[in-house]
Image: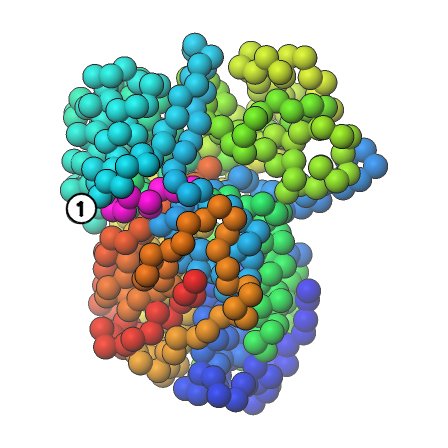
Amino acid sequence: MSAGGDTRPGHRPGDRAGTGAAARGRRVVVIGGGLAGIAAALVAADEGAEAVLLEARPRLGGATTSFQRKFQDGTLWIDTGQHVFMRCCTAYRGLLARLGVTQLTTLQPRLDVEVLIAGSLTRTRLRRTRVPLPAPLHLAPALLGYRAIPPADRIRAALAAFRIGRLDQRDPSVDGDSFGGWLGRHGQSAAATEALWELLTVATLNAPASEASLGLAAKVVRTGLLDGADAGDLGWPEAPLQQLHGDAAVRALEAVGGTVRTATKARAITRSAAGWEVTLDGGEVLVADGVVLAVPPPAAAGLLPEGSGVDPAKLRELGVSPIINVHMIFDRPVLDGPMLAVVGSPIQWIFDRTVSSGLAEVGPPGAQYLALSQSAAEEWVDQPANDLRKLFVEEMRRLFPAARAAELLEVFVTRERTATFRQAPGSLGLRPGQATSLPGFALAGTWTDTGWPATMEGAVRSGIAAARETLAGMGVAGSALSVVGHGPPGQRGESRGEAPTRSGDIEGLTPASAVATEAGTVDVRTVSAAATAAEPAAPHTATPHTATAQTETSKSTGGFPV
């Protein structure tokens, strides 16, 4: 996966005849190989630049990757977190199509979440109606039939959802308020907050309602539930995340002349007379015409070049929120569906990873691998693994009769201490835009100001926008950015279970002044929501070249159409 890069300014192996003429002969170095960095590198390469993607870890994928773990006589793939997306997550779905891996995911024909009510051990569903009602009326039957909360609370919840949809998430008074505080002032009971609102927002914002930004919660509710009748339909991977993201990205980048260098850490970024210099561990220097910095906030704060106009103290102030995953392998089936939400329990979401992990091939016949995804995990992240195993195994056996009779073959815990930035009230003012005060230098990552929560959709959108800004600073802007046909037709089919897409339903990135900011991903931590609500990116007045990249006259998506 790792490849060396010639540091001579004139060496451009990525030149390709007939594509991206304005960028040909230019080099873009992308630092950070998560989804944001992958998206940025692909946009740059597709526009004809030589894209060099650097990743400090041994593999690409960032927070959405996998590792291997021995189990009995075989090996399993373990995902770093359980990631779910929504139909409205158009940038992320476009990236999957660009990578040729859409067929490795499943997308529901309609939103249908089974919910276990822990107190009564009964089940209900949060399900989109089959009746073709227009948005937002389509939401009413789903809420009115949701038996996890009392009937009176269902009516109040429907009214609250419509009110949330009218909030301006960029109003400082909205962003500065807590979602829980707003819910309390608008007639939402503690039961409704826990069983409905936090079912959505703990997963997407990685924070309880009392500690979550009202602005970001409004984004999730509006774009994931209100803007389109089918916006909230859920999708999930049917293969290890490493195959879905990292491995596919290496193939895609190398196919267009890009270079991927893993286990390679950047130490400094400096401007030079020729453009940019990126100094690596060991002293090697890469010369570039543009740079995209796509690493987590603390690392980005330490790498910001002088004159960027970005305050490193604000990046550090963003903080972190952890997620833990408790993995259980039973000798027989315990869960009868691909996933299940739980309310009134320490357990939040359960996913069946039997097939995607490889257990179905290497494990005992009939064994099942379940992953319990626990967002907003501050109370658990530092607890000893034995204590966590005891807590969650006992709860699984209380909730599921089949688990009481099953033999538990293995239990282990994975921790993501820095899973997301802290999406707290006031966090909007801490998030920088992708553009900076330095032409040819841009930022990418879920923590940049995309208008989205820290989700896969936000990551991809930030990478696309950052690549456009970097290319603009190199003189590639506006209508020069072409729409690229991505991959052979056979790699661009619909995912399993997916209904045909509406015309214009899937887009990459429109000019940023008309960006469709479509809403979150469940990372369960993921609701990757996103639909068709237009919200312009925040202007960056210190960056003259930004207007060129975001011109209204450009017809390019600059992204990855499905």
- Compare residues 480 and 142 and report the one nearer the observer: 142
Residue 7: name its quadrant.
bottom right
Occupied quadrant, residue 484: bottom left
Above or below, 116 against 257 in this view is above
Q: Is residue 253 left or right of residue 195?
A: right
Q: Residue at x 42, y 31 (%)?
A: 113
Indicate left or right for 51 with 155 as reference: right
Amino acid type, callout 1: Asp
The residue at the point 56 percent across, 89 percent down is: 10
Secondary structure type for disc 1: loop
Which residues are drawn in magenta? 226-234
Q: Is residue 31 magenta?
A: no
Residue topped by disc 1:
168
Q: Residue at x 71, y 37 (%)?
A: 360
From the viewer's perspective, tell me whether residue 41 is left or right of residue 91: right
Quick one: quadrant of the C terminus?
Answer: bottom left
Where in the figure is residue 138, as x and y percent of width and height?
Answer: 25, 37
Estimate how packed mark 1 is, as few (under 14), some (14 to 19) or many (20 or more) residues with alpha carbons within 10 Å. Answer: some
In this rendering, would 32 be left or right of 240? Answer: left
Q: Give x and y (percent) for residue 465.
A: 37, 65
